Amino acid sequence: MLWLACAAGVVGLLASRALVALAPVVGVCAVLANPNVRREAGLYFRNGAAMRAAALFGFLLVSGLYTSEWATWRHELFRSLTWLGVPLAFTLAVPLAGGQRRAVGALFVLGTAAVGLATSAQYLLDPGSANAAISVGQNMQSITGVFHIYFGVMLALSFFWGLRLRQHPEARLWWRGALLGAAAAAALTLHLLAYRTGLLVFYAGLLGYVGWLLTQKRLVMSLGILVLLALGPLLAYSTLESVRHRVGSTLWDLNQYRTGQDLNDYSLSKRLVAAETAVIIIRQHWLLGVGPADAHAVMREQYDWRDYGLRDASQADVHNQYLNALLGGGLVGLVLWLAVLFWPLTRRWARTNPDLCFFILIQATGMLVTDTLSLQIGLNMFVFGYGFLVVAGEAREQRKLLVAGC
């Protein structure tokens, strides 16, 4: 049943919000279906990854003592139940077998690549219109409607996970070929559609991959990827019109901010202004923040003092998960968030799992330029990956210790 919940979660991320919402419910049912759930209930409270996720929910709950946006707080509390439900499922449900875990990974990789190829085909049907949109800072959504920032992150994850899955000793030749093709399709889609955030995390992942290969003393392959890191962006710029348009629009956007011009139609400029505005508020509420539910309203109030010439509709919230954690939760909220994101790397079993390390690296990099958890798809994408890789990994280690103790 947990496998069914995972499959629903993957398909939901790619195509259906209803399935994403249903997946945690199926996961909780999988917990109830575990015949040993009473005996193993304590594992949830001993699972550090699950407890750190619960601490985020607990902080949001406590912030109700000083929030002034009650309707928003109740909504945030409801949507944040996923921090409890997903780790609970991966801790107490009958764990997935190795083959089932690989099947979930393959579904994500092949599904994301398929949606990427379909979106690329849509682009190629009318590249002129698409490139014109890119030149003014707009992006194509995926053909299934996934927001471009999160779809770019999913494509980057698919590239690295696809390469990892094909290296499994039980993978047959045709299966390795399919996964290699999927990884190539994900990389091609990222460049063809010129997803700025997706390309950022893609190349950050490649740099991290070089570091991992160096720890394995694979110097020749490390050198090859370093060459790819240097030549890939240049080759994409010289061959793809969409990339040239993206670079041009980005440079123009930054120049608008640098010279103090009209910023209303420029994405990066509005994000930089939002960061400036948030820093002013953070300095005044550095310990506990303004409350996660109050962040949007307080940002609007600060824009009333200085709006940088932005219309109301152009006044953006913070597009940086770390600044957003500081704004809503202050130093306490940031520490809780950093513990969720990076604490797994203090565990040896996690550091030696490249799939988990790629997940953390790509998510952590993407969060420099987007507040991933503010939209439901971003929250679901992170919590699902966190549950599947981190919480489930720690649960497996706990069960090994229990078996060894017996």
Image (cartoon, rainbow, N blue to C red):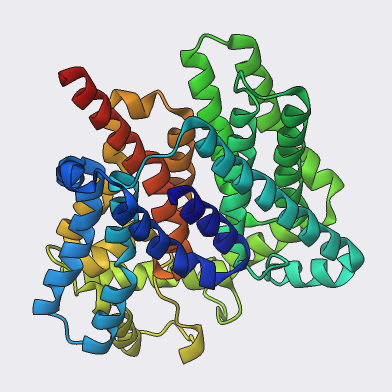
Total number of numbered labels?
0
Q: Residue furthest front?
A: 35
Residue, x 15% and y 46% (percent of image)? 45
**In the image shown, does 195 or 49 lie closer to the viewer?**
49
Which quadrant is the C terminus positioned in?
top left
Where residue 391 appears, as percent x and y from the top left, is 32, 43
Could you say which quadrant of the image residue 130 lies in?
Answer: bottom right
Where residue 225 appears, as percent x and y from the top left, is 65, 24
Residue, x 51% and y 84% (percent of image)? 314
Residue, x 56% and y 77% (percent of image)? 261
Where residue 66 appears, as percent x and y from the top left, is 10, 79
Q: Is residue 155 left or right of residue 344?
A: right
Could you say which quadrant of the image residue 242 lies in?
Answer: bottom right
Establish if 118 lies above or below 76: above
Establish if 316 lies above or below 188: below
Q: Is residue 26 left or right of residue 191?
A: left
Residue, x 68% and y 19% (percent of image)? 224
Where residue 173 appears, as percent x and y from the top left, is 76, 23
**In the image shown, does 350 or 330 lie closer to the viewer?**
350
**Is residue 118 at least partly visible in the picture?**
yes
Establish if 372 lies above or below 74: above
Q: Residue furthest left?
A: 65
**Is residue 311 at least partly visible in the picture?**
no
